[in-house]
């Protein structure tokens, strides 16, 4: 039997989780792996670029109505070969999404879907900004094997990423999961200097950068992955490299030490100083020295 790896993508809303996860799923499929992407957004948008116009029924919502479902009936195979599953969402204020993710994951296992589909990777694109206890359950209970925490060049995205890392570290006390920081829109100042320094400060060893690519934006507007829309582009090559880097990511040697609130506030002021200095032309975009 194959050992299927679960990788979850976390981070603030709007920073590119769904688009990047879909592209990485497509890149892994192109590299010969069997991949399932699971989304939990209310808009069912996680797998949109993969499945195009094919409609999907949200599995968790159906489960809540019927109490028993056959999970494979909700999985769609995309033209690029990626399997897609949308969970749907909760009625605001009712229930716990993390528990839902856990229930569905158990179904994938117990109903034999993982084995039938021969899955190598399950990529969870988890939307939700606040890492409540429930949110962290799938990590504590060993459902996930790797976490990719995404951020961009804004301070609020870093605060969310920092909270997510704190939750993961707390949840996986006995066995620290490999955690990678993926900096999206890394070409927007001060993403690189600030987040490189942040990763060093909290002892996070794995960090990857992804710049803004017009072709990613355009392919998303056309409802496709960049691999499907522009197979020979630099953006596609970047996605292939990123997919490789993510699957090769190793368990951390050091346990990351996320920032406390006081330290975060120091970072906020540094962030503002850097941004102001750059906007007023005092320093260039490439300058990574401390201010
Ligand atoms: N590296 C990138 N280059 C260009 N556009 C990007 C990039 N990453 C994300 N985007 C765009 O950002 C927007 C938000 O992405 P989305 O995946 O919906 O965010 P999230 O799932 O985190 O809420 C989309 O329009 C997407 O095309
Ligand atoms: Mg999303």
Image: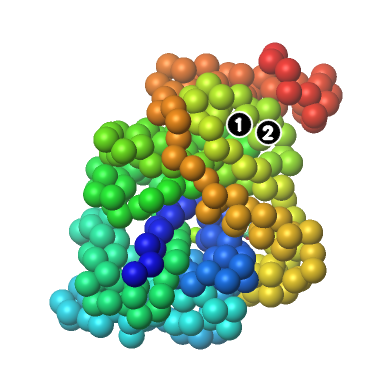
Is residue 27 found left or right of 179 in the rendered image?
right
Q: Distance between the residues labelled 2 and 1?
A: 5 Å
Callout 2–callout 1 Cβ contact below 8 Å:
yes
Q: In this view, does 215 lie to the left or right of 12?
A: right
Packing grade of label 2 (10 A; few <14, some 14-19, many >=20) is: many
Q: Is mark 2 within 8 Å of ligand 1?
A: no
Asked where in the image residue 99 lies, by quadrant, the reply is bottom left
Q: Nearer the viewer, residue 130 or 170?
A: 170
Identity of the residue drawn at 27% across and 35% down: 174
Coordinates of residue 235 in the picture (x, y in percent)? 74, 59
Q: Which residue lies furthest to the left in this view?
A: 67
Q: Is residue 149 above or below residue 106?
A: above
Quarter holding the N terminus? bottom left
Residue 59, image x, y percentages: 31, 75
User: Crowdedness of circle 1 by 10 Å Cα count: few (<14), some, many (20+)?
Assistant: many
Percent position of residue 120, x then y: 45, 66
* Residue drawn where x is 45% and y is 35% of the image: 252
Examine the image and state in which quarter residue 225 appears: bottom right
Return the x and y of residue 179 as percentages of the image width and height.
Answer: 46, 41
Q: Residue at x 28, y 50 (%)?
A: 142
What residue did someone put label 2 on? 192
State the SS at label 1. helix
Q: Mark 1 points at which residue?
A: 195
Is 139 in front, or is 281? 139
Query: According to the image, what is the colour scheme of the structure?
Result: rainbow
Image quarter of residue 8: bottom left
Give the quarter of the figure containing the C terminus. Answer: top right
Numbered disc 2: secondary structure: helix
Residue 47 seen by the camera? no
Q: Does the residue labelled 1 lie within 8 Å of ligand 1?
A: no
């Amino acid at each position: 039997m194959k050992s299927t790896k679960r990788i979850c993508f976390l981070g603030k809303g709007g920073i590119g989780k769904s688009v990047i996860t879909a592209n990485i799923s497509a890149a892994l499929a192109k590299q010969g792996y069997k991949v399932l992407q699971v989304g939990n957004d209310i808009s069912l948008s996680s797998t949109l670029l993969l499945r195009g116009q094919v409609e999907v029924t949200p599995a968790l919502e159906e489960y809540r109505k019927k109490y028993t479902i056959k999970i494979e009936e909700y999985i769609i195979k995309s033209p690029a070969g990626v399997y897609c599953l949308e969970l749907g969402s909760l009625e605001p204020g009712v229930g716990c999404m993390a528990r839902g993710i856990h229930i569905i994951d158990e179904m994938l296992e117990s109903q034999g879907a993982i084995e039938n589909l021969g899955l190598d990777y399950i990529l969870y694109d988890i939307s939700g900004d606040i890492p409540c206890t429930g949110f962290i359950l799938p990590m504590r209970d060993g459902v996930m094997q790797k976490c990719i925490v995404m951020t961009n060049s804004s301070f609020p995205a870093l605060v969310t990423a920092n909270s997510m890392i704190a939750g993961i570290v707390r949840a996986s006390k006995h066995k620290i999961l490999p955690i990678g920081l993926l900096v999206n829109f890394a070409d927007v100042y001060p993403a690189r200097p600030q987040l490189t320094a942040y990763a060093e400060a909290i002892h996070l060893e794995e960090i990857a950068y992804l710049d803004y690519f017009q072709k990613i934006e355009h392919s998303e507007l056309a409802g496709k992955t960049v691999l499907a829309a522009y197979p020979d582009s630099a953006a596609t090559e970047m996605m292939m490299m990123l997919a490789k880097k993510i699957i090769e990511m190793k368990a951390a040697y050091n346990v990351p030490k996320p920032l406390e609130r006081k330290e975060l506030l120091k970072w906020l002021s540094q962030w503002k100083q850097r941004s102001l200095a750059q906007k007023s032309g005092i320093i260039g975009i490439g300058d990574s020295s401390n201010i």
